Image (spheres, coloured by chain):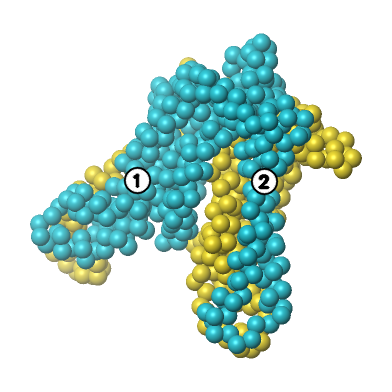
Amino acid sequence: MSLPTRQNPAAKAPLDGSAILHRPVRRISDRRFDRVNIVFLIVVILVIGYPLWFVMIASISDPQAVDTGRVWLWPVDMTLDGYRRVFAESSIWIGYRNTIVYTLVGVAVHLAIVLPCSYALSRTQFVGRKLVTWYILFTMLFSGGLIPTYLLVKDLGMLDTLWAVILPGAAGAWAILVGRAFFTQTVPEELNESAKVDGASDFQVFFRIAIPLSAPIIATLALFHGVGLWNEYFNALIYLSDRDKYPLQLVLRELLVVSQDASQGGGDGDSAESLTEQLRLASLIKYAVMIVSSLPLLVIYPFLQRFFTQGVLIGSVKE
Amino acid sequence: MNSVIAPGRTVGTQPAQALPRRGGRFRRRVRNSWQLWILVLPAVVFFFVFKYVPMYGVQIAFKDFIASKGIWGSEWVGLEHFQRFFSSFYFWRLLRNTLGLSLYQLLLFPLPIILALSLNEVKNRFFKRFAQTLTYAPHFVSVVVVVGMMVAFLDPRIGIANHFLGLIGIDSIPFMQEAGWFRHLFVWSGVWQSLGWGTIIYLAALAGVNPELHQAAEVDGATRLQRIRHVNIPAILPTVVILFILDFGSFMSVGFEKVLLMSNSLNAETSDIIQTFVYKSGLLQGQYSYAAAVGLFDSVINILMIVGVNHLARRISDTSLW
């Protein structure tokens, strides 16, 4: 990795700092502090970055070289076989397609529930505002839990359908609070009032004024919920049994996790034969499949970082 | 609002006049916000069906649920399931494992704070940005892949970790299969995933620190470490307290989806926690009522925890959730 170049800016840092703060003398202890601090951060970066780096180089190295420990810093005997196998594996493609469908539909449902509700809750003239807010907040404190939720989904006849994966977690109090905080700020009461004076109804204010202004909050909510759905496996595990409906994460679970421990519950139809088959396949493609499944998010998030940061920050400011 | 309430107080003297006025205006306001009610309707229905109906369904914890009779028709058995759980062989083991994992995680609570304080001192914007972006990355990796990485890295025969250990002459360790390693692996892989992400809130709080405080401290001859200790740390303390309380709110729910992935028959002694037990006894073995009772026990402890810690925080530090 490009560590040496990282230290150059660090060496320059004290100069920048003193220029900004008009500091006449920089103490030696301060400079030592900066140096120790940078070293500390470099260690943190290496520790956090190395596993990701290793997966990357292992995915393009010869599996034999990986297994014998010859791969640790650079790819050895580079090959794209792993990726070729991944792309040839139909279960992964089906999983990929399902995950994309679940994520898109799930995000749409999420926004359809959260946006109108959080807008209405941000209007002080809304009679019932307090009541509805508490009705939603209470679910943060107490929930029915796994078993009653499962029985409900079963009774609704949603087992083995897309809805079982999407609906039970489609909205939460957190998202509504975030949305409410946003609309309180972005569509202030006065804007609302003047639109009303001009004869606009609440619907018109919401669809014509609030929605066009809410691109940032739509992005934030969609990204948080979308990442959650993309990485989710548990709902799919308990509600789906048809393999053609498995999302990517569930396919990965069988390849990466279950195959190492046959005694784990939950796997269905894992005969001994298919298990050995899976083991063999897993050893060939495990690193490539990790990359293929994680890459979309890892590539996207640096560009959308401000929306994620925004979500964390609005979400933390209560009331 | 005042004008509405005031006549109400004098109801005794002029009831005939006060009540209709109040009612009329209220009704008009309700009528005026019917469109807002339509806007909240999807959410109200959603929360009713998927949050409140399961709460109502919790009653099966006190019943003997039989699928053909349904939740309503099954017979009441009182606290039988709870008694069975408390006296079962697993009770203490589950409690110990759940609490053990939670406490272990709580102990590492300062780590993101330290990283945030350190990042905040970096003057070079590119290095800071690079460090942030890189440390956020694991947050976007799914738990399935994280556990898959552990399985691959820690394999006793072909894992990279054991190859490294071999270099320094240590025999390979079957990490994933040993009960003694489970807690460390679970908690530290969690640190790997969430350390960077956890700094976001603290960095924002640190960005809000008044620079004059730093300048004043500097004039007084404070070193960098002293300024961190006496300016930055007090400034983010309220944020720290709030997040600490919130952490307690999920005290018993220790990333159960990851535990489930990591648990196997060999490490069950430490990896069996209350929630995986609910999953296994309820959904895999079909003991719905029993599992619901165990789950209810879990959420009651959670509520007690968050209420108690909030109370404590209010008395000690004047910062609390409510």
Q: Quadrant of the C terminus of chain A?
A: bottom left
Label 2 Cα neighbours within 10 Å, binned few <14 / some 14-19 / many ≥20: some
Q: Which percent across, then down, holds residue A237?
A: 54, 26
Q: Left of A173 or right of it: where is A89?
A: right
In x, y percent, where is residue A144?
Answer: 50, 38
Q: Residue at x 60, y 87 (%)?
A: A24
Check disc 1 and report the residue beneath it. Answer: A114
Q: Is residue A212 left or right of residue B196?
A: left
Nearer-N-terminus badge (2/1): 2
Q: What is the total number of numbered labels drawn onto the structure image? A: 2
Q: Quadrant of residue B132?
A: bottom right
**Spatial distance from mark 2 to mark 1, Cα to Cα?**
38 Å
- The residue positioned 80% from the left and 40% from the top of the image is B164
Up-down relation of residue B263 to residue A192 (above or below): above
Say whether marks 2 and 1 touch (CB < 8 Å): no
Labelled disc at residue A50 = 2
Q: Chain of mark 1?
A: A
Q: Which chain is cyan?
A: A
